[in-house]
Amino acid sequence: MKKIRVINLLVALFGIVLLIPAGNARDLQDIRRDGVLRHLAIPYANFYTGRGDGLDVELIRGFARELGVRYELVETDWQHVFGDLTGRHAKRNGKDAQLLEATPVRGDLVANGMTILDWRSQVVDFSDPTFPSGVWLVARADSDLSPIVPANDIAEDIRQVKAMLAGRTVLALPNTCLDPGLYQMDATGADIRLQPRGRKLNEMVPAIINQDAESTLLDVPDALIAMERWPGQIKVVGPVSGQQRMAVAFPKDSPELRAAFNDYLQRIRSDGSYNVLVKKYGSSPNGVGRLS
């Protein structure tokens, strides 16, 4: 009987081990051996246009050349991006990350203007910052929400914006940089309308123009594009976040790949080729840029 119990215990433990996803993220030596760098990207602004080009496409294509490997673009979405990178889906749960089900790894890094957020840093390791950002409240032009008068104090600017939101409808997108939980939006009294998981960041402005709500959270690069794409139809009310930073995301078990990218980024910044690259896509690397 004791032998049977031991066998049953081993079987149970073996079953548990099988449920633990094998880490199949690749580090620098694996990528050089396999001869390909897989770039995960979500269509967003001109970081990745969805048409095979963009600021981050050229940035990572250049990194692949530096490594002497073939570049491969792998499109993903916000629902699957962390699973595609690490082998475990993840989402925000309060201030922390919640790991979900296992899934096959499809890429080696994520680059599409991803904002560095505390909960995301529990799931992935970020490169040195690549681009500045922030989150604004954007409203339809016919809204009586008035743009704030900047106070030269970001905390006061945010307070002014939030003070006018009681009873106002605001679109937000969970599990992204537009997640209302990141900015304590529930304390404003606003009618927060969470968007479907499949909605894209660049669909938020068309939604408010279509009167799904009066306003939306939007990060700075997308807001700048939207003002050019829909002139006279929207207005920026003011910030709901302080300055944020974007970066390239790596699996936590790919430290050598991340270090190699940071070296590459530092070099192209020093020799001016990074500035040339961002100017090509209409943005400024020294401040909140124009990326349209």
Image: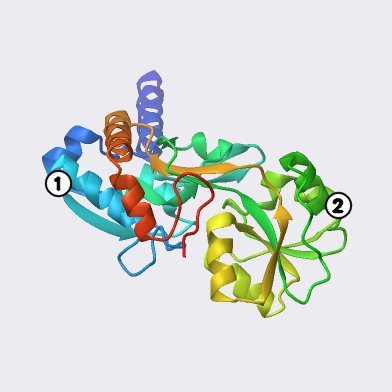
Q: Mark 1 to mark 2: distance in Å?
A: 52 Å
Of callouts 1 and 2, the N-terminal one? 1
Image label count: 2
Residue type marked 1: Val
Residue type marked 2: Ala
Badge 2 crowding class, 10 Å Cα cut-off, few under 14, some 14 to 19, many 20 or more, is: few
* Percent x, y of residue 164: 85, 57
> Is residue 155 in sight in this rendering?
yes
Q: Tell whether 36 sits left or right of 87.
A: left
SS at circle 1: loop
Tell which of 261 and 234 is nearer to you.
234
Tell which of 147 and 217 is nearer to you.
147
* Percent x, y of residue 288: 54, 50
- Above or below for 220 versus 64: below
Q: Tell whether 237 sits left or right of 259.
A: right
Badge 1 crowding class, 10 Å Cα cut-off, few under 14, some 14 to 19, many 20 or more, is: some
Occupied quadrant, residue 26: top left
* Percent x, y of residue 48: 38, 61
Q: Mark 1 points at which residue?
A: 69
Residue lying furthest bottom = 210
Q: Name the residue under label 2.
A: 163
Closer to the camera: disc 1 or disc 2?
2
Quarter of the image with the N terminus in it:
top left
